[in-house]
Amino acid sequence: MSVHRRPPLPGVQRLARALALTAAATGALGLTVGAATAAPLAPADPPGRSEVKTQVDQLYEEAERSSETYNAAQEQLKRLQSEAGSLQNQVAAGQDELNRMRGDLAAVAAAQYRAQGLDPSVRLMLDNDPAAYLAGARSLDQATARQDDALHELADRQRRLDQRRQETTAKLAELEGVRQHLAAAKDEVRDRLGKAQRLLNSLAPAERVRMAADDAREAEQRATRGTDRLDLGDQPPSSDRAAAALRAAISKIGSPYVYGSTGPGTFDCSGLMYWAWRQAGVTLPRTSQEQASAGRRVSLAEARPGDLVIFYSDRHHVGMYAGGGVVVHAPYPGARVRYESVGAMPVSSVVRV
């Protein structure tokens, strides 16, 4: 059957999504969210269902933004750790080389001191072999010139080593800043999921159970829906690699959404794209914002199977075009990888890798 633009989800079904905020949905960040069956809050004036729906929808969107911030910070942390390690190795190797050069120069200086203890003319008169002495003197002059060159090189190496030390210090400071940013992003995700859970707990337990059952039934139907049940059209992928990436993404339909995960059993939105294209031999950037610049922009009307579809103005969500106006994506916490109408969310751009 054809896939049409998805109508807005009823408040009951949309709110039920949050009931699946379990350890599986937050395990990648080590988050702990209160159980859905916890005692509801008892405010003086509890919010109505419509108000709860609006707030929970907003919290989910904020949590997904924070998740992509977390992913970006993780990638930056890995890069900085590698760069800092390389700089530290360069500093250690440079210090060893300086120590060796200083030792060599000290030995040459000591030999010169011993050889030049007498006036050269006196040495010439006392030497049993004046010709050998003159040859040695010329060699000594050459050694002195080489020593001067070595001293200049030593000073240059020292300057470069000091510069590497400064770069290492700056890189380690940057690394610490990213660690703090990573922790803040993690706290933001935890905070928003916790708020969403508390809002859901403010509803009656029986109502939460009904919502959970309805949403689980709908999610199961979506997750098990295959290409034979959808009209994905007959437009071919843009390349063999795009075809391989799409096959990989479709093979993960039904896999749970987990923040920060890149598979092979669980995924967040950009993690699914990252994993699927890796199966095609292509390494994409890790976050949806970076993936928006991972290839050539095309219009939505020109989209081909395998293209990346970036959603929302801040590009915090991504799916893969499957054809027929449908994407395959990892939607949100508690949901599973599934097909979705491309019109279900505002499209920011389409990228052909």
Image (tube, rainbow, N blue to C red):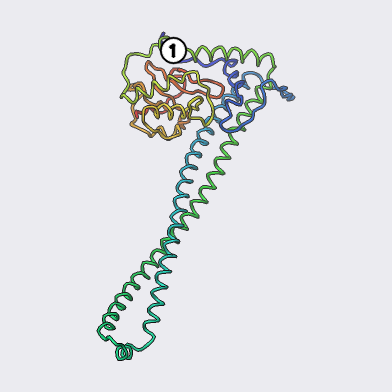
Q: Check the image and report above or below for 97 versus 172.
A: below
Q: Residue furthest left?
A: 131
Residue at numbered disc 1 = 226
Position in image of residue 81 (x %, y %): 49, 46
Q: Is 216 displayed left or right of 5 in the figure?
A: right
Position in image of residue 350 (x %, y %): 37, 27
Q: Check the image and report above or below for 264 versus 162.
A: above
Secondary structure found at label 1: loop
Looking at the rendered structure, the kind of residue marked 1 is Gly
Q: How many marks?
A: 1
Q: Taking the image as drawn, is residue 48 in sight? A: yes
Q: Nearer the viewer, residue 320 or 82?
A: 82
Residue 318 picture quarter:
top left
Position in image of residue 129 (x %, y %): 27, 85
Label 1 crowd (10 A; few <14 / some 14-19 / many >=20): few
Q: Is 186 displayed left or right of 137 in the figure?
A: right
Q: Residue at x 57, y 44 (%)?
A: 180
Residue 274 picture quarter:
top left
Q: Is 288 displayed left or right of 121 in the figure?
A: right
Position in image of residue 90 (x %, y %): 43, 55
Quadrant, the C terminus: top left
Residue 326 picture quarter:
top left
